[in-house]
Image (cartoon, grey):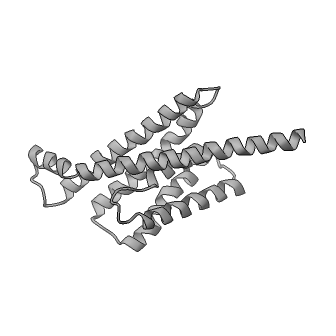
Amino acid sequence: MKTKLNKSDLLIVALLVCLGIVFRVVLQDYPNVSPVAALALLAGYLLSSRMLALAVPLTVLMVSDLYFGAYAPVVMLSVYTLLALPVIVGVPLRKSHQNGKSTAFKLVTIGATGLGFSVLFFLGTNLAVWGSSSFYARDVAGLLECYTAALPFFRQTVIGDMLFVSLLFGSYASCKVWLTSKASQLVSG
């Protein structure tokens, strides 16, 4: 079944991609503080086409990596995959927020989802680093050493993901309330 592309979806994609590229470049001096996972989650939440939603994080990564340069292929593949995964959760998250769910429920589920993807990103990318590099021994001790060495980056990932999930979903909710208010004024006025 084909989903018809509409102008508002394309505008959302363009806006999210531009935001992602700008923030990735501006925040380059802050390792692992990135908007990509939050953008992927929001794209999955907002867009009816999963393929269009997947284009958001993948385009942000591809374009900004032209600026940053390539890195170990296995690690790069894990980064792209793990930062695209939040798209998949967007639709079920949106559906769970329907039917008059409380604001607290929405905040908790969005925050928990963002935190869950931070943990998944940490585990997956560091497993890829351990498996593809010669820095660590190929045993449990080497894997634990890899995860231990990456803990400062994990902190940065959590900070970035929580910051951008809050900023993006908060901005979306604020715009939705403002637009609803303006529409009500137009109808009653």
Q: Nearer the viewer, residue 165 or 99?
A: 165
Image coordinates for residue 102, horizontal then vertical, percent: 58, 26
| Res. 34 in view | yes
- Name the image quarter holding the N terminus: top right
Q: Is residue 171 above or below residue 89?
A: below
Image coordinates for residue 112, horizontal then vertical, percent: 43, 35
* Residue shown at 45% from the left, 38% from the top: 111
Total count of labels: 0
- Name the image quarter holding the C terminus: top right
Image coordinates for residue 4, horizontal then vertical, percent: 69, 52
| Res. 6 in view | no
Instruction: Give the side of residue 174 with respect to residue 92, left or right.
Output: right
* Residue shown at 64% from the left, 26% from the top: 100
* Residue shown at 36% from the left, 46% from the top: 158
Q: Is residue 2 above or below residue 26?
A: above
* Residue shown at 60% from the left, 48% from the top: 49
